[in-house]
Amino acid sequence: MTTTPRLSLPLLYLDTLWVQVTGTVCNIACKHCFISCGPKVETHQLMTRERVVQSLDDGVAAGLRAVWFTGGEPFLHPDILGLVDEALQRAPLGILTNGMLIDDALAEGLGERFRDAPYNLEIRVSLDGCTAQDNDRVRGKGVFDKACAGIRRLAAHGVEPVVAVSQLDDGSASRLAFVELLQDLGVTRPRVKWIPPFRIGREATRKGGRSYQRWERLTAEDVADPEAPLRLQCGTSRCVTSEGTFACPILINDPSFRLADRLPDALGAHPVDHEACHTCWVEAFSCSA
């Protein structure tokens, strides 16, 4: 009996290293979260400082150009500013956050690093509506006000965050509305990044969402396109977690997409036959761009 080989792509080079510093541990449990994070979700636990530093050094040795901290919620990590310092000694750093834990002290610390670190620091705050009613229906009661307070504090300390907006099937957000909201919060150069729907995790079962349909898959013809490794972010990135190294931060809950324990052993070809790969393909989407 023969088995059909999995669709796969080579890693062209390592541009971006994703570091899942808090794994799947988050302070909220969004209804549309595609990796189903939450306060008690420890599928991937917090990474130790030693593990993060080892991964950063592995990434530098492999030629990385940028680092992103994600989770879960990165600012739950008890040593997050220390990890930020480690990353900013090596490469530009981005942090994905819901913004709720950014108090004045943290905003001040991030502002200092934004001004003084040898590499650029970018903060990206997730919001899925321009009002509490629109945002909190998927993110939870009280999230909007706390996230907006975090954005205001960042702006006051010279860090102008990007706002990441999930494009939900039942959503109604507009770019102009987000620009106006950010201006009201003190952001002088509003930037908005739209996130297409990844129909896995909680989004697949959420009322108003849906799962992937059978035809939503990459094909052998897609993968044969010479531009495929550049069109899919996994062609130039890797993700490290407490549980190993993956090609993509979206697929860390699927063991069949685990490549290796450490990054140096995960720089070869990787599978792209997950249904979520279809979203990246048709949207030409990159989490880091």
Image (spheres, grey):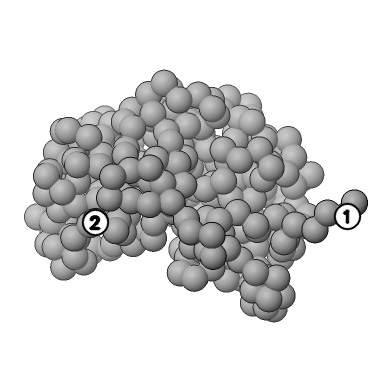
Position of residue 134 relative to residue 191, above or below, is above
x and y percentages locating residue 193 in the rendered image: 33, 61
Earlier along the polypeptide chain: callout 1 or callout 2? 1
Residue 123 visible to the viewer: no
Residue at (65%, 57%) from the top-left corner? 273
Residue at (11%, 44%) from the top-left corner? 133
Secondary structure type for disc 1: loop
Residue 40 visible to the viewer: yes
| Crowdedness near tag 1: few (<14), some (14–19) or many (≥20) residues, C-alpha within 10 Å | few
Q: Write down the quadrant of residue 224 in the picture.
A: bottom right
Amino acid on which the number 2 mark rests in the picture: Asp
Q: Write down the quadrant of residue 160 in the picture.
A: bottom left
Q: In 3D space, how far apart are the residues under numbered discs 1 and 2 (Cα atoms)?
A: 43 Å
Residue at (70%, 70%) from the top-left corner? 220
Between residues 79 and 99, which one lies in front from this camera angle? 99
Between residues 242 and 152, which one lies in front from this camera angle? 242
> Mark on residue 2?
1
x and y percentages locating residue 218 in the rendered image: 61, 66
Secondary structure type for disc 2: loop
Which residue matches tag 2? 170
Amino acid on which the number 1 mark rests in the picture: Thr
Residue, far front? 1
Q: Is residue 280 left or right of residue 50?
A: left
Between residues 37 and 63, which one lies in front from this camera angle? 37
x and y percentages locating residue 83 in the rendered image: 50, 34
Residue, far bottom? 226
Of tags 1 and 2, the one toward the viewer is 1
